[in-house]
Amino acid sequence: GAVVSQHPSRVICKSGTSVKIECRSLDFQATTMFWYRQFPKQSLMLMATSNEGSKATYEQGVEKDKFLINHASLTLSTLTVTSAHPEDSSFYICSADPGLAGTNEQFFGPGTRLTVL
Amino acid sequence: GENVEQHPSTLSVQEGDSAVIKCTYSDSASNYFPWYKQELGKRPQLIIDIRSNVGEKKDQRIAVTLNKTAKHFSLHITETQPEDSAVYFCAASSAGTFQGAQKLVFGQGTRLTINP
């Protein structure tokens, strides 16, 4: 149980285009999902908290108009990178907390490798 | 906000020896401390976690200790094997901003290499 999927796993796009990444909780509902970005040989950095039915909460320094988050249902959150540039190339990972009793464990998606040419 | 420091950044040990990775955190309100193993290009995999009401937890060859007073926690891997080679991240969970969701702040990571 507690499986999270992401789509696509890899995407290559041209500079200036927009890319949408989907994060789905397959066997549980998640009121809250999280989006992380990981550059090569670096740690996971939280970008934003995705809240079902309301606006996302962005971490300091993350442009909300560039990284659009939509949490349309209790099993789906999407991250859209608008007007992507080469510096946005990174590994994007989502996670979800199923609210298991006694733990705050988050379950991670497999990640999406974005390459902007 | 929370800040997590992790050391060392790289660690190389002989197969069969023990490995220890240490983390410190800044927010005394943090109450959940997971450790993740990440292989190249893969998602982080939870290997063990501990809550602030417990001082130590063990699962076979892996153990975690927590010192709330000093605000540090450590991962111990005994009888290391080549398949333990990976990047390990500690994290601390602090209160989120919506419906009690707690966000994770990660340490910088430790690249562990087990030499046969």
Image: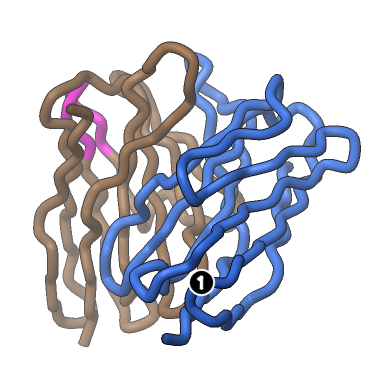
Chain colours: A brown, B blue
Amino acid on which the number 1 mark rests in the picture: Gly
Q: Secondary structure at mark 1?
A: loop
Taking the image as shown, residue A62 lies to the left or right of residue A4, namely: right
Q: Nearer the viewer, residue A60 or A41?
A: A41
Quadrant in the rendering for residue A89? bottom left
Check the image and name the residue furthest to the right. Answer: B69
Percent of width and height locating residue B1:
73, 42
**What residue do we see at 61% from left, 51% from top?**
A60
Percent of width and height locating residue B54:
69, 24
Percent of width and height locating residue B60:
46, 44
Question: Which residue does the numbered mark 1 point to in the structure image?
Answer: B16
**What residue do we see at 16% from left, 55% from top?**
A20
How many other residues sit within 10 Å of disc 1, few (<14), some (14-19) or many (≥20)?
Answer: some
Q: Nearer the viewer, residue B93 or A115?
A: B93
The chain holding disc 1 is B
Q: Is residue A77 above or below residue B47?
A: above
Residue B57 painted magenta: no
Q: Is residue A82 above or below residue A70?
A: below
Percent of width and height locating residue A33:
34, 34
* Principal secondary structure, stretch drawn in magenta: strand
Residue A71 painted magenta: yes
**What residue do we see at 37% from left, 17% from top?**
A100
Instruction: Read off the magenta span.
Output: A70-77
